[in-house]
Each structure stands twice: as C-alpha cells, then as structure tokens.
Image (cartoon, rainbow, N blue to C red):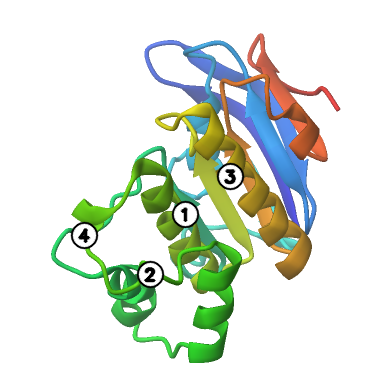
Amino acid sequence: MINLIIKNKSYDKVIFTDAQIEVEKGDFIGIKGPSGSGKSTLLSILGLLETFDGEYYFEGQLVTKKNLEKIRQNNIAYIFQKPYLIPYLNIKDNILMPLKNAKEKWDESFFQEIVNLLSIEDLIHRYPDKLSGGEAQRVAIARAIMTKRKLILCDEPTGSLDPANSIKVMNKLKEVVEKYNQTIVMVTHSNDFDNYFNKLFYIRNEKIENDK
C-alpha cells in the first residue's frame, strides 16, 4: 500500500536519515519512540502534510507535487488526540461534515452501521458539550471511518482518556481494521496497547525499526 523512503528530514536537528517504512493494506501499526524522536513528524509525512527528501509510493504510484493533493484527499483520514468536534453542529452533522465539505454522497445505512459499531447511536442528536471524553473520541473515529478513506492516521487518540475509555477506543479501532479492512497507523506513548498492533515500529537514531 505504502512504501516510504526518507533520505533526510530535518528541522533544527536531523529527524530521519535513510529511514524506511512499508504499510500494507489492513495493517494496524503502532509507532513508538522517545519524545522528540519524530513520531508525529512521521505521521505527518505519511499523511502527505510534510515535505521531506525521499520517495513516497502510494499503491505503487509515486507521489509528486502534481498528484499529492488528490491522493491525500481521496485516501487519507485523521484522528487526533483531541476530537476537534464543531460545537454548533450535532453529532450526526459532525460525523458527516468531511463528506459534506467534499460534496460527496453518503450512505445512511453505512452511517447507522458505524454509529452502532461505535456504540454512539444514542448520541447522534446531542451536541459535543454533552459528551464525555471517550464518547467524543468515538465520534471522531466515526467521522474518519465514514469517509471510507483507505488509510487512517491516529496521533495519540487515547492520550487524553482514562484507562477504561482508552481500552474502548482501542477495541473499536481494531474492529474497524478487521471489519472494513481499513489501514490504521497510530502514534502512541503507551506500552499497554502493543498486543493490538500487527506491526510495531520504534523510532531510534533517525531510523524506523520494526519491533514486531
């Protein structure tokens, strides 16, 4: 699905040198490493949000300046540490917002399937300020899945949740991978979720090492 070769990525310091990662369809990948090692940078590069010196192949196609925007819009969705729900929209409209913004059609039966999967069917007419942290994060997951994008990138999606809600979110993400064969790459600091991932990468010494 993805073959990423980073010859060099630098800010004030070098982050990656001759680093490489491969992502296959249906993977649930964990990205770990010390603070400042480049976890979020790697996620941004995978999401085609950061420039770098190297090559990026998406489904065998080399990403260039000409096709980058189209590949990103058509194939990639994001889940962040904070849900970033729009306060004046109810939950259903929050979930559908990316599709409406892109003027894409949406399937009501698929919407119902997703909200049932994530156990938020009773929340869809509420507003974000009436949700708990765990509920809001499951809404953010629903929003990403609803786009039917092939790759979902998650930056610390359990970082602000208590242990019980963290487990709920991880269980739901794993269900998404298994049920819809979507691909998820997730940055995490936690050692508690290693068993959820079929691949685990650790950033060390400017390289991306496969730990699993």
- Mark 4 or 3, closer to the camera: 3
Quadrant location of the C terminus in the rendered image: top right
- Res. 148 visible in picture: no
What residue sits right under mark 2 in the picture? 95
What residue sits right under mark 1 in the picture? 138
What residue sits right under mark 4 in the picture? 86
- Res. 63 visible in picture: yes
32 above or below 78?
above
Q: Position of residue 17 (x, y in %)?
A: 64, 19
- Mark 4 or 1, closer to the camera: 1
Of the image marks 3 and 1, the number of the one nearer the N terminus: 1
- Give 24 or 128, whichever is nearer the viewer: 128
2 above or below 94?
above
Task: Classify 10 Å Cα crowding around label 3: few (below 14), some (14-19), many (20 and above).
Answer: some
Identify the mark at residue 101; answer none if there is no mark. none
15 above or below 136?
above
- Mark 3 or 2, closer to the camera: 3
- Give 46 or 107, whichever is nearer the viewer: 107
**Three-letter amino acid code of the residue under disc 2:** Ile
**Three-letter amino acid code of the residue under disc 1:** Arg
Residue at x 82% of width, y 22% of height: 211
Measure the alpha-carbon separation of dots 1 and 2: 10 Å
What residue sits right under mark 3 in the picture? 168
Measure the alpha-carbon separation of dots 3 and 2: 19 Å
Kindly indicate whether the residue at mark 1 contacts the one at mark 3 (C-beta within 8 angstroms): yes
